[in-house]
Image (cartoon, rainbow, N blue to C red):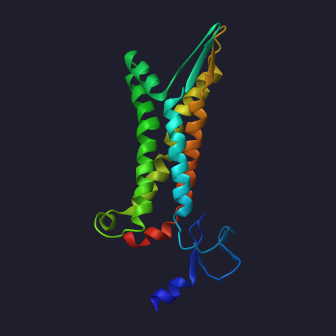
Amino acid sequence: MIEAEREKLIVCPICEAVNIDKVQNNYCRRCGTKIYHHDKTPTEKSWAYLITAIIFYIPANLYPMMVISRPGSESGSTIMEGIFELWSHGDYPVAVIIFAASICVPLLKFLMLAYLLTGTKYSQGIHKKIDKHKIYHITEVIGPWSMVDVFVVGILAGLVHMGSIQIIAGTAATAFALSVFFTLLAAHAFDTKLIGGSR
């Protein structure tokens, strides 16, 4: 009886309001968003966004994040090179913040999303013991911190006007921003109904 009643309900992916399923033309009673039942592979879209984010994250670490242009010369540094440079100059707090935001946070979010997506398929053992709702909310909280490195480059590019020296956002800045964007899409596309049993 409970299962039959549950089948008649549908959750809004935006505001998570529970609505009565009308089979066709379902709109959320709270925010008006068009809602629908997932097909046989409800995690397919999240996986696609997550894999795309990981692909963009690779060039984000291989190419220069920031390029310093001077007359007759141009130099750039990757994220790790910038961190080592800051550390060698004694800027330890800034180096740690950049390392945490640009390396640790994205990798942690990739791992947590991958865990949630695989956990929807395998609900036994360790997957059953860990509260997946908490993990999902952690990914939402730490998400914006991934953009710290891009913000730093943007601020420097806007503030530094020392004669002929020019700071330009490198290829990695674009790739990194796209990686963060697709990670956010992966988290947004994840259906929290799939982890309802973990509570």
Q: Is residue 56 left or right of residue 104?
A: right
Asked if residue 32 is positioned above or below residue 172 in the image, the reply reads below
Q: Position of residue 191 (x, y in %)?
A: 52, 66
Asked if residue 41 is positioned above or below residue 50 in the image, the reply reads below
Instruction: Name the residue nearer the viewer: 17 or 88.
Output: 88
Instruction: Name the residue nearer the viewer: 142 or 61.
Output: 61
Q: Is residue 27 left or right of residue 178?
A: right
Q: Residue at x 52, y 87 (%)?
A: 5
Asked if residue 41 is positioned above or below residue 164 in the image, the reply reads below
Q: Residue at x 46, y 52 (%)?
A: 139
Quadrant in which residue 123 is drawn: bottom left
The answer to whether residue 199 is seen in the rendering is no
Q: Position of residue 24 (x, y in %)?
A: 69, 80
Instruction: Name the residue nearer the viewer: 154 or 194.
Output: 194
Name the outermost residue toward the bottom.
Answer: 1
Q: Is residue 69 left or right of residue 93?
A: right
The answer to whether residue 191 is seen in the rendering is yes
Quarter in which the C terminus is drawn: bottom left
- Image label count: 0
Q: Residue at x 43, y 37 (%)?
A: 103
Q: Position of residue 104 (x, y in %)?
A: 40, 39
Q: Position of residue 112 (x, y in %)?
A: 41, 53
Instruction: Name the residue nearer the viewer: 33 or 50.
Output: 50
